[in-house]
Image (cartoon, rainbow, N blue to C red):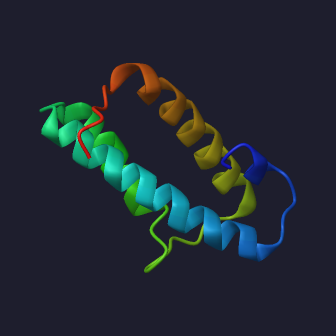
Amino acid sequence: MLLFALGDNPYGYYEILRWVIAGISGYLAFIAHEQKNTSWTWIMAIIAILFNPISPFHFDRDTWQIIDLISAIIFFTSLFKLKTSNKI
């Protein structure tokens, strides 16, 4: 979703993106906290705050594209750095 956001999409797409990314990064921050991985907890918490849909940040399009790209790279890296369990 973050890489697709680099294109020209309707505003509704970006609203949904905020909810999805804030939720996923909040969950990953919780996972990182449970694993006592402080750096990943902070990284995911910052992403959750940036994308939070309740009180959104308003940056220009170029800034959001950079944030989207960096966030996509961080999420891809987290696949290898954060170990999730199947105990849900």
Position of residue 36 measured from the top left corner of the image (x, y, whole percent): 12, 32
Quadrant of the rendered image containing residue 32: top left
Position of residue 84 measured from the top left corner of the image (x, y, whole percent): 31, 32
Q: How many marks?
A: 0
Front-most of 37 and 39?
A: 37
Front-most of 15 and 62?
A: 15
- Depicted 14 relative to depicted 37: above or below: below
Q: Is residue 74 left or right of residue 30?
A: right
- Depicted 71 relative to depicted 58: above or below: above
Q: Residue furthest front?
A: 87
Q: Residue at x 44, y 80 (%)?
A: 54
Q: Residue at x 58, y 47 (%)?
A: 67
Q: Residue at x 30, y 35 (%)?
A: 86
Position of residue 88 measured from the top left corner of the image (x, y, whole percent): 26, 47
Q: Residue at x 14, y 39 (%)?
A: 34
Q: Residue furthest top?
A: 80
Q: Is residue 62 left or right of residue 78?
A: right
- Depicted 78 relative to depicted 1: above or below: above
Q: Residue furthest bottom?
A: 54
Position of residue 38 measured from the top left corner of the image (x, y, whole percent): 17, 35
Front-most of 43 and 17?
A: 17
